[in-house]
Amino acid sequence: MNRSLLPLVVVLVAAACTGRSPAPEATTTPAREIVLMTHDSFAASDEVLAAFEDETGARIAILEAGDAGTMLNQAILTKDDPIADVLYGIDNTFLGRGLAEGIFLPYESPLLDDVDPTLLPTDVDPDHRVTPIDYGDVCINYDATFFTELDPPATLEDLVEPAYRDLLVVEDPATSSPGLAFLLATIARFPEDSGYPWTRYWEELVANGVEIAPDWEQAYYGRFSGGSGEGDRPLVVSYASSPVAEAYFGELDEPPTGVVVDGCFRQVEYAGILRGTRREDLARRLVDFLLSPTFQEDIPLNMFVFPANTEAGLPEVFVEHAVIPGSPLGLDPELIDARREEWIRTWTEIVR
Amino acid sequence: MSRPGPALRTLAAVPLAFLGWFFVYPIARISLLALAPGGRFDPTPFAEVVTDPGIRSVAFFTLWQAVASTIGTLVLGLPAAYVFARYRFPGRRLLRALMTVPFVLPTLVVASAFVALVGPGGLLGVDLQGTVAAILLAHVFYNVPIVIRGVGAFWEQVDPAVGDAARTLGASPVRAFRTVTLPLLVPALASTAALVFLFTFTSFGVILVLGGFEHATIEVEIWRQTVAFLRLDVAAALSLTQLGFLAVVLAGYNRLQARRAVVLPQRPGSRHLRTPRGARDLGAVAGILGVTAAFLLGPLVVLVRRALLTPTGFGLDNFVALTERTTALFVPPVEAISNSLRFAAAATVLAVLVGVTAAVVVARDRGALGRGLDLLLMLPLAASAVTIGFGLLVSMDRPVDLRRSTLLLPIAHALVAVPFVVRAALPAMRAIGGRLREAAAVLGASPWRAWRTVEAPLAARALAVGTAFAFAVSLGEFGATAFLARPAAPTLPIAIFRLLGQPGRGTIGPAMALSVVLLVLTVAAIAAIETLRVGGDEL
């Protein structure tokens, strides 16, 4: 036999032998570990996560599974045999799909009493299959240095005025979560059956020179002129907390950007216990932990969204600069789930 | 032809059961999803595929990038194919072997190499990631070896005397080439072009990494519709549409192959080789080889360099970092190595078992069973890896739930590898028991001696080549794996993909290091094939 084959045979035999060891899942998930599935934007302080381990003796293994939609789809595609115990980061634009697919187990956390009641999706989820953990508002941001003589827009309607021609950049709702939120805001504000439907609003936005970017990064850093943006458009769809982030990371006394508080869409992120988990008790404790002030107070500076627990204190920079829109827009999660694709397709035809 | 005997029929049950369960059945489930999403006939998913402007532009892009890649590949590959076909020079065999390397590389290694070359912070200083240029460059890099090998080998066997004769009769060199040599090359050119077209049409990993948001092939769109939008019916309709199209292309390719066999050449090729003489000849040969070698080997050198690059110079930091867990991957990247080896070992066993039994049946039975099996075996090739992965994903819940089984990935890899194993084993299986045995008997060998000295080594070598093929295919498989791998047990390509997908988190260096590991493992497997093959030629 040819000598050169020997190494290959050795590798094969060695590999075949290791193949008899227990299934990979079992080796990486010992009894005292709980898997938290979340999206790629998840961030938390190590010492905060360690607090859970001190409390329960179980380590939290974070499984980042792509953007929010991809994460949820992965949970759905593996639903009889979940790859995690708890899912965190499904938002109200995807909640309908998650609930309809039946991937969550009901759990009513004792800490729900401290949660802002407007965040509870009571209509669609009376048995608490999901628990609100954080929220944030998607709003138009403006470059404060640009709007010195001209006032920043005050309403969504202003954006179709000639004064704001060629100033706005938005994200593609097909590929971007804030982009979708903004589209939903316009649908909530300009209902289809009204005299001025959202489709007409978007036609006018297009006529007024709105620019489309594929995702938030390219819109904010690439096309927006304010703050850390390097483009030339002074208006962008971003978050109500973006100016706070600008002040925090730029170590500035005043943020270089501002928020248009009209026409904001509220995104609420929920956590839920995945059906099929073999550690339901531990999973419940993890949901409690996510709602506890320890974790909740760690949220703002890590993910730049607001804690759902009203007892949780806000960091200094949020207290100083954060803007929380008084009456954000929202839509029924089941309606969103039923019509999302159709809306996006209609939108694509309008802007194309 | 007589009906196949019971032994042969029993043997045929192995590949038939495997392909039936893991290929035909999943395709049936895909068809059901696409044609009857709600339980009864409903062509809406197809209507959507046809009318959705987004999907139409994906189809258009898939087609034109494949055509452009094919043309680019031929333009860059033909001069080198000519040099290898006509000239003798020192290091010819080694250089040709090296130039074959890109073709056997896993797609994620190619993608990594081009990120290192023309990605953000790449060596060339231009960031082409997300552009068509990056995609076409990677495709040409990937496929030029097919031209050098496929057209080159054929060209080598075309007797230059034919062209010389034309020139003696007064034709200019251009005219002689155009009217005599080129027509002889057409079958080889056409079948090579068809193959390159097929490969680039179903490109997945390269596009996913280098194509950014805007560029998607049908393969990428199937993946996106599944994981990003959960529109399984649309993904299924896309899968079926592509399957139909590829089957047509593949049938065309097979006809070309058949015709090509008819025109086969006159004399063994190496006799026509000449040494380059004179400054012009020498310059042209050196120039063509230099440019081609730089294009084919440069990206790999850049990949290795990037893997060794650290913030403070060169070192093994990126390799050391493979033992650390990052947010990009659920487990330390180093675990992907043992996962991949383990999956590849299991996939190899399956693929060799299925492939060799199939090859025996196809070689022995010239009737409907053998021919039908031969055709069935080629189908996974037309189906594309993404369709195989998608099909297993949507079908393995019933009748036995295999979705959690650690065998699911090896099964998928074996499906992708089986056509290759069959092709490797078939010639030997045809020879065994046939004329070789008769020749040995005529020369006075007993049946036992004939088996031991002639047939057994032949069978062993075919088995070994098939083994190495299956192993290499499994190591690099990405399209099917992307649908089936679980986060706790990523393979090397999956780990590389995840690491590459998180720019700004310091995972690009480790991604390059892991790509180098995969590169080395693959090249080792391929080197084994080459050595065994060469031995086979000498038989």
Image: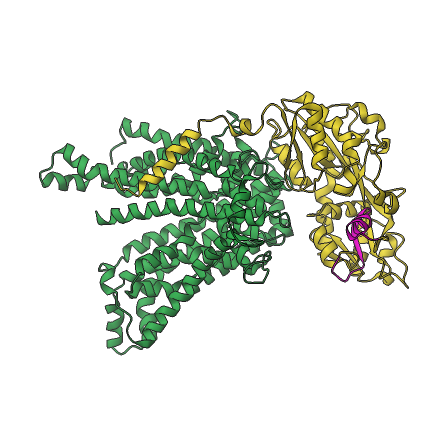
Is residue B239 visible in the rendered structure shown here?
A: no
- Pick whichever, B27 or A60, lies toward us: A60
**Residue at 14% over, 35% down:** B449
Q: Which chain wears green?
A: B
- Quarter holding residue B18: top left
On the rendered structure, is B174 left or right of B390? Answer: left
- Pick whichever, A112 or B170, lies toward us: A112
Is residue B527 visible in the rendered structure shown here?
A: yes
Q: Where does the image place residue A111, in percent across and percent down from the top left?
A: 81, 25
- Quarter holding residue B434: top left
The extreme front residue here reads B312
On the rendered structure, is B250 left or right of B1? Answer: right
The residue segment tinted magenta is: A229-252
Which quadrant does the N terminus of chain B fall into? top left
Q: Where does the image place residue A87, in percent across and percent down from the top left?
A: 68, 32
- Quarter holding residue B148: bottom left
**Residue at 45% over, 45% down:** B382
- Pick whichever, B161 or A30, lies toward us: A30
Q: Which chain wears yellow?
A: A
- Pick whichever, B404 or B344, lies toward us: B344
Q: Where does the image place residue B283, in percent across and percent down from the top left?
A: 36, 73
The extreme top residue here reads A281
